[in-house]
Structures are given as C-alpha cells and as structure tokens.
Image (tube, rainbow, N blue to C red):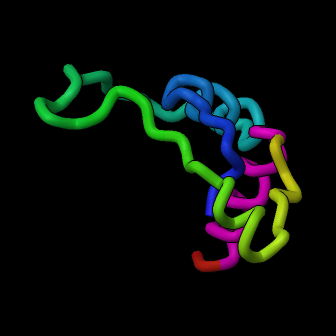
Amino acid sequence: CGSGHGFSVREVIATMKIMSRLDFAVKEAPAREGHPTVVVADISKMKQVFALKPRCYSLDLICRSAFDWEKKSL
C-alpha cells in the first residue's frame, strides 16, 4: 500500500548496497519521457477506511525485508 513517504532511487540503491554488502553495478540513464519524476503513495484513504497505518517507515528495514524475501526465492 505504501507509507506516504517516498525515497529516491539513489537512496534505495545506496541502502541496498550497504545492507546487502554487495557493490553491484548501477547504470544511470536519462529519465524516460512521460514518466513522473516523483511517485509517493497517498495512504489517507487506507487510514480512513481500514484504520491501517504503515508499520515501517525505515528504508533500512524495508530494504532488509525485501532482500530477505528475495533470498528465500533463490
């Protein structure tokens, strides 16, 4: 659903490199025409309708959870 807080692609890459202890290659490219520069989930309806709040705002924890999940599928 999202958390209502966004992170840049560079922030996510840097966090994944630190957390995973892998120095993977990153190839930067120009932004694609028509793609939004920023996308952040609006969680107001989720909070109102379902009384749900995000459990995690920490990029470190989000990346760790995603990395651990991916490792299980290998």
The quarter in which the C terminus is drawn is: bottom right
Residue 60 left/right relative to 20: right
The residue that appears at 74% across and 30% down in the rendered structure is: 18
Tell me, yes or no, whether the highlighted magenta stretch contains residue 69: yes
Residue 9: x and y in percent read: 49, 31
User: Which SS type dominates the magenta stretch?
Assistant: helix
Q: Nearer the viewer, residue 49 or 23?
A: 49
Which corner quadrant of the image does residue 30 belong to? Answer: top left
Q: Nearer the viewer, residue 32 or 42?
A: 42
Residue 43 left/right relative to 55: left
Residue farthest to the left, as pictured: 33
Residue farthest to the right, as pictured: 55
Residue 48 left/right relative to 56: left
Q: How many marks?
A: 0
The quarter in which the N terminus is drawn is: bottom right
Residue 66: x and y in percent read: 68, 60
11 vs 49: above or below? above
Bounds of the magenta segment: 58-72
Q: Nearer the viewer, residue 61 or 36?
A: 36
The residue that appears at 61% across and 25% down in the rendered structure is: 11
Residue 6: x and y in percent read: 61, 35
Residue 28 left/right relative to 59: left
19 vs 71: above or below? above
49 vs 29: above or below? below
Residue 8: x and y in percent read: 54, 27
Which corner quadrant of the image does residue 46 belong to? Answer: bottom right
Tell me, yes or no, whether the highlighted magenta stretch contains residue 43: no
